[in-house]
Image (cartoon, grey):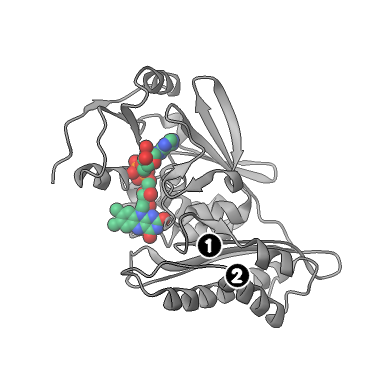
Amino acid sequence: MYPQSFEYITPRTLKDAVKFLKEHEGESKILAGGQSLIPILKMRFASFGYIVDIGGLQDLSYIKRDGDNIRIGALVRTGEVEDSQEIRMNNILLAEAASQVADSQVRNMGTIGGNCVHGDPGNDLPSVMLALDATYRITGPDGSRDVRASSFYKDSYSTDLGETEILTEIVVPVIQHGSGGAYVKHKRRSGDFSIAAVAAFVTINELGNCGTARIAVTSIGPINFRSRKAEDFLVGKKLSDQNISKAVDLMVDSVEPATDPYGSATFKKEVLRLVGLEALSKATDRALGV
Ligand SMILES: Cc1cc2nc3c(=O)[nH]c(=O)nc-3n(C[C@H](O)[C@H](O)[C@H](O)COP(=O)(O)OP(=O)(O)OC[C@H]3O[C@@H](n4cnc5c(N)ncnc54)[C@H](O)[C@@H]3O)c2cc1C
């Protein structure tokens, strides 16, 4: 199917883009890599008078080390995240998840920003951002503001992003010695969205116990979310197989996935258990350096 007709706008600067969105509030939509928006337009799930293609804003395409953080421009392609030496060396959780998004064609076009703001609970990178406690820099007509990923997701396809705002940058921490992260995803076929996936991040404290645990889930509810019950259980305890298993039980017992073509609720819970166990075990091994 062809999309309904629209006017195609190519702003030359971020300021021009924001100005246009403000002047045409309610009628315009940002286009980045197009890997989610184009299918929506073609299937006529939505239509807009103006499509504002920000792909030409080269200023939003960078990966920079900044002290203990890595700053990533919103237009960096998922494939560039996967291949970046800076990210592979200093944030394996993000590189690992990026490499599991869709297939190489989608990763070559889709952007990190689009993946994170689209609001699809099946998208992989929002869970990574929750586990990393990432910050989103958002620019709108009234200037810029920072929002933590943990307060960004409201409901399916509903986020804290206003209609006249643009995500410009994502800030993730460098994963330090004594910390570890992992992303484990189970899907039916290569290139698919997951049946369930888990992003896990843990730190080890001076007593050798869990200092911080952030465990985020993909594809199991209306939004990507953190399992606070599992996290609270782990903090202060040894990251033993037994405790990891108990934390995963708490996570699985607290969810109610829908039965749909991806599988029954029971099946999805079992998949969540397996990916949760693997992600937490892998993150722990990385934190311990084994
Ligand atoms: C076949 C296929 C398989 C896929 N499988 C997976 C998968 O396994 N895992 C996964 O995570 N994703 C998957 N995706 C989704 C893909 O990763 C998309 O690229 C991503 O969701 C959107 O990024 P984009 O740059 O293409 O955004 P676009 O499609 O251009 O935009 C998506 C939405 O985000 C908004 N937007 C984009 N950038 C910004 C910005 N900087 N500021 C404000 N709003 C913005 C747009 O207005 C739109 O609402 C798949 C897509 C396809 C087509």
Q: Residues within 10 Å of mark 2 (few under 14, many from 20)?
A: many
Q: Amino acid at mark 1?
A: Val
> Which residue corresponds to the image point at 25% horizontal and 44% vertical from the top-left?
45
In which quadrant of the rendered view does residue 228 lie? bottom right
Instruction: Out of 193 and 65, give the one closest to the viewer.
Output: 193
Q: Is residue 288 left or right of residue 151?
A: right
Expressed as whole percent of the image width and height from the top left, the position of residue 273 reads: 54, 76
Where 173 sits versus 97, above or below?
above
Q: Which residue lies most toward the left here?
A: 1
Q: Which residue is mark 1?
A: 217
Q: Residue at x 60, y 70 (%)?
A: 251
Q: Name the residue rendered at 61%, 74% in the picture.
A: 248
Residue 269: x %, y % from top left: 49, 75
Q: Which residue is mark 2?
A: 251
Amino acid type, label 2: Met
Q: Is residue 196 left or right of residue 55?
A: right
